[in-house]
C-alpha cells in the first residue's frame, strides 16, 4: 500500500512540473526583450537582432537559458516575474 502511494505521489508531482509557458517581457527585460516559453523546454528569445529559438531548464526557482552561440543566463522566478542581475543592472521580465 505504501509503495502505491509513493508512485501516485511521484506521478502527481511529475504532472505539475510542465515548465514555464507564456510571454515575459517589459522595459527592464533587457537584453532579452521578450521571452516566449512553450512549456517543453523551448523558449523563443526576441532581442535586438531578431528572434532565436533557445532552450531552458528549471531547477527549483532558477531558470537556466541556453541561447545558440554560447550565450544564456540564469533567471530567478519571483511571483509572476523572472529576475536577475547583469553586471549590476537589475533585469525583470514580467509575465505579459
Image (spheres, helix red, strand yellow):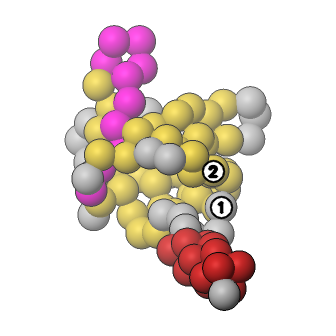
Q: Is residue 38 magenta?
A: no
Q: Position of residue 10 (x, y in %)?
A: 63, 73
Look at the picture and state if 74 lies above or below 82: above
Q: Which mark is residue 92?
A: none
Q: Which residue is mark 2?
A: 57
Give the CA separation, mark 2 to mark 1. 6 Å
Q: Position of residue 60 (x, y in %)?
A: 50, 47
Q: Residue furthest front?
A: 1
Look at the picture and state if 87 lies above or below 61: above
Quadrant where the N terminus sits is bottom right
Identity of the residue drawn at 29% across and 25% down = 90
- Nearer-N-terminus badge (2/1): 1
- Please state the extent of the stretch shown in magenta in the rendering: 80-89
* Residues marked 2 and 1 touching at CB (< 8 Å): yes
Q: Is residue 51 visible?
A: no
Name the chief secondary structure element in magenta.
strand
Amino acid at each position: 500500500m505504501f509503495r502505491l502511494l509513493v508512485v501516485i505521489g511521484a506521478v502527481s508531482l511529475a504532472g505539475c512540473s510542465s515548465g514555464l509557458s507564456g510571454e515575459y517581457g517589459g522595459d527592464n527585460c533587457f537584453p532579452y526583450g521578450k521571452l516566449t516559453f512553450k512549456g517543453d523546454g523551448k523558449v523563443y528569445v526576441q532581442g535586438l537582432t531578431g528572434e532565436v529559438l533557445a532552450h531552458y531548464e528549471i531547477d527549483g526557482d532558477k531558470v537556466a537559458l541556453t541561447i545558440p552561440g554560447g550565450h544564456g543566463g540564469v533567471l530567478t522566478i519571483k511571483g509572476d516575474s523572472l529576475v536577475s542581475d547583469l553586471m549590476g543592472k537589475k533585469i525583470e521580465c514580467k509575465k505579459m
